[in-house]
Amino acid sequence: MREDLKALAEKVEARIAPRFAEIDTVARVNTEKVICAFRANRVSDTHFGGTNGYGHDDIGRDTLDKIYAEVFGAESALVRIGIVSGTHAISCALFAACAPGGTLLSISGMPYDSIQPVIGITEELPGSLKYYGVKHDVVDLKPDDSPDYEAIAARAADKAVCAVAIQRSRGYAARRALSVAEIAKMIETVRRVNSTACIFVDNCYGEFTEEHEPSEFGADLMAGSLIKNPGGGVAPTGGYIVGRREYVERAAMRLTAPGQGTDCGATLGANAALYRGFFMAPHTVAQALKTAVFCAGMLEELGYRTSPDALEPRSDIVQIVELGSPERLCRFCKGIQMGSAVDAFVTPVPSDMDGYADKVVMASGSFVQGSTIELSADGPLREPYAAYLQGGLTYEAGRYGVLCAIEEMMA
């Protein structure tokens, strides 16, 4: 590692030390929540065994559902390894929220790339919401990335609106993540004018980044991936849905079949990893946040535009660095890959990905394939050629990966 980069890293760490202290405070609060939920539900090694076949009477699975519901301040939860991705969890939730012939209103701008085919925005695929007669409308954020509460109230008042969707994280958009306080106000704005619409929050990348979650403030449904924040880097696969009991049951029937819902779903020996991952999650998320803050601090010193900046409050684990050219984007991702413990010898190359309009370059040297709570960086090959950095199981490893990425860009 170059000596000048080591010196710059020490300078940056001194500047960002107050942010690290704030992140540690959030991790302590959320860790206490998780432990209290484990204790209240009398977790023991009995819960770590698995089931096969139909998975009926899986005490470990059913107790973990209760723990997720308690930690996220919800009535009910569905935590399943049969949910294959965050997009799958969101899809199940949206089908639970929407009614044929109704309108789904997205009030945080256009949804994330991989959600658009689910809704039927990019194409009318068999099985999409559009295929079943659900219309879609959008309320954009303001130019400063804040919610447009006046426009939200006007559009949500339409009686045809059966569901309202809020995306907490930025996806591949340049806008910042929405804070829990902003989401709470968006929910309150909708409820003033529409008492029946199901309010859904895509919580991917946001869990445990703040002391509270959107489900504590009236969201009817919320969903995310276990190979992002709540899996703690331990869960091997899966997703979760939390919220009001009736909607969680509807989502379960979309995942399985009408009449089966939450009563089935074999865990195949994964329970111990799901419990351990959720226990680790607040700490692991803190490591990822520290990695993101360090990345922002370093790249700012080198003259690049970052979002959020190093000292800005955060509501997700995603860090954007605008690199300005496809060559720098690819070299940054190559450096992240080189700094990983797994597949460090691999060179990421841009390629087509399902659900994305542009080629994407992705670095992910992870123990769990595609895990974005582990250190990864990716970005679409379109202007401003931004790298989207996520994760870091430990700050020390994340720090090293960021330095490798910078060194590779400077080579």
Image: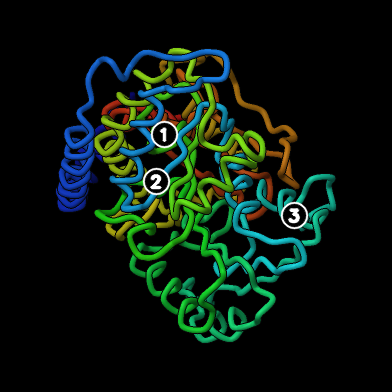
The disc, 1 or 2, on the residue closer to the chain's N-terminal end is: 2
**Cα–Cα span, label 3 and label 1:** 29 Å
Q: Position of residue 223 (x, y in %)?
A: 49, 47
**Left or right: 397 in relation to 183:** left
Q: Position of residue 170 (x, y in %)?
A: 51, 56
Q: Position of residue 97 (x, y in %)?
A: 60, 58
For residue 317, which numbered disc appears in the image?
2
Instruction: Read off the residue under disc 3.
Output: 129
Label 3 Cα crowd, 10 Å radius (few <14 / some 14-19 / many 20+):
many
Please tell me whether mark 1 sits on a helix, a strand or a loop: loop
Callouts 1 and 2 close, C-beta under 8 Å: yes
| Front in this rendered view, residue 369 or 52 | 52
Please tell me whether mark 3 sits on a helix, a strand or a loop: loop
| Residue type highlighted by circle 1 | Ile
The disc, 3 or 1, on the residue closer to the chain's N-terminal end is: 3
Residue shown at the point (64%, 42%) measured from the top left: 254
Label 2 Cα crowd, 10 Å radius (few <14 / some 14-19 / many 20+):
many
Does residue 237 sit above or below 90 in this rendering?
above
**Cα–Cα span, label 1 and label 2:** 8 Å
**Cα–Cα span, label 2 and label 3:** 29 Å
Does residue 392 sit above or below 108 in this rendering?
above
Instruction: Read off the residue under disc 1.
Output: 373
- The quadrant in which residue 183 appears is bottom left
| Residue type highlighted by circle 2 | Ile
